[in-house]
């Protein structure tokens, strides 16, 4: 009986469960110090402007003034036209520069070199004073004095558009070169001509590379158009300056113009974002979050007071 009892195995000892790990986020005191310093600087700037001799009450009144609205419209109008001219001419110059013809490629290279190497303001002033070099424009079928032909509008359009074409040609060239060479070889194997291959195969695929910097160039064009003030074109800065010369509210009018520039650039930045998001559908597994989605995520992280790595 005792021998049988000795053969009975002892019951297994249950394993001791491990202690639950309690993750404690690392405290980053430097972030709090940096945040406090930034807030202090912002408070100092706000205090300085609040005590400055600026009549803030008239700024909302002039935001919807007819003269200011006309200047904002002219700014948008010349920016769109100059960008369209730069885009069309930029595509042509990019194709010329990539051509195997040494004459066309050299001319295209010289065009880009010249317009990218000289300031936009100098180019505007050259177009504005071109009548000193060519007093009369004689094309055979059309003849007129250059002062009558080269209006402030045409001066601004040529000065801004031709300069933009140099930058757009480089953007288009980079987009075309981003398409694999096998796409061109396959199109030629199917019997497509060079021009048809460019229109049907290369450019549609290059748009994913061309669109983002083109949007940035247009937003930059909205601000660069302010240089047309030097050639007496009635854009936003010119209109604001005209008002300030009679009302003596110089700084206030610059604030009004700045607000309108911020409005225009913000609207077109949103448009640019959604255009880029559309062209990213074929190259990305998941689309980037929209600004509203990013805002909700940041609010959740801010409300949790945790690091983004451990936030649930």
Image: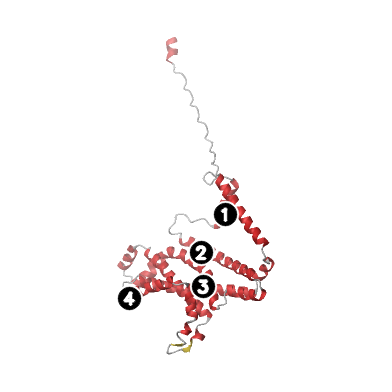
Label 1 – label 3 distance at C-alpha:
31 Å
- Residue 307, position in %: x, y? 54, 45
Indicate the quadrant containing the C terminus: top left, top right, bottom left or bottom right: top right
Query: Is any atom of residue 1 visible in this view?
Result: no
Residue sitting at x 62%, y 76% = 242
Around disc 2, counting alpha carbons within 10 Å, would you say few (fewer than 14), some (14 to 19), or many (20 or more)?
many
- Which residue carries the number 1 mark? 295
Along the horizontal axis of the image, is 203 left or right of 265? Answer: left
User: What x and y, as percent, mark residue 121?
Assistant: 49, 74
- The numbered dot on residue 111 is none
Mark closest to the chain's N terminus, 4 or 2: 4
Query: Is 283 rendered above or below residue 158?
Result: above
Q: What residue does disc 4 label?
A: 103
Earlier sequence position, callout 2 versus callout 1: 2
Q: Could you tell me residue 277's position as x and y percent?
A: 49, 60
SS for dot 2: helix
Residue matched to label 3:
80
Sequence order check: which comes first, mark 1 or mark 4?
4
Relative to 258, 193 lies left or right: left
Q: Are marks 4 and 3 in contact (CB under 8 Å)?
A: no
Q: Which badge, 4 or 3, is on the more N-terminal residue?
A: 3
The answer to whether mark 1 and mark 3 are in CB contact below 8 A is no
């Amino acid at each position: 009986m005792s021998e049988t009892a000795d053969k009975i195995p002892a019951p297994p000892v249950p394993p001791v469960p491990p202690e639950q790990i309690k993750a404690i986020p690392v405290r980053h005191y430097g972030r709090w110090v940096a945040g406090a310093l930034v807030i202090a600087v912002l408070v100092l700037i706000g205090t300085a402007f609040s005590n400055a001799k600026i009549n803030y009450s008239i700024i909302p009144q002039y935001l919807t003034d007819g003269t200011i609205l006309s200047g904002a419209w002219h700014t948008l109008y010349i920016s769109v036209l100059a960008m369209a001219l730069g885009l069309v001419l930029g595509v042509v110059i990019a194709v010329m520069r990539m051509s195997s013809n040494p004459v066309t490629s050299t001319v295209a290279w010289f065009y880009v070199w010249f317009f990218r190497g000289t300031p936009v303001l100098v180019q505007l002033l050259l177009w504005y004073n071109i009548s000193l070099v060519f007093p009369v424009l004689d094309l055979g079928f059309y003849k007129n004095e250059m002062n009558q032909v080269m209006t402030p509008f045409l001066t601004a359009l040529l000065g801004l558009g031709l300069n933009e074409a140099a930058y757009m040609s480089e953007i288009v060239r980079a987009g075309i070169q981003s398409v694999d060479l096998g796409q061109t070889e396959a199109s030629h194997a199917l019997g497509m001509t060079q021009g048809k291959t460019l229109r049907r195969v290369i450019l549609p695929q290059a748009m994913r590379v061309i669109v983002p910097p083109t949007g940035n160039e247009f937003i930059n064009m909205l601000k660069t158009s302010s240089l047309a003030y030097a050639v007496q074109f009635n854009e936003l800065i010119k209109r604001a300056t005209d008002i300030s010369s009679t009302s003596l509210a110089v700084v206030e009018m610059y604030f009004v113009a700045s607000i309108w520039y911020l409005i225009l650039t913000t609207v077109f930045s949103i448009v640019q974002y959604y255009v880029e998001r559309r062209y990213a559908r074929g190259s990305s597994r998941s689309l980037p979050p929209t600004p509203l989605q990013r805002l909700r995520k940041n609010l959740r992280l801010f409300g949790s007071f945790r690091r983004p790595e451990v936030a649930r």
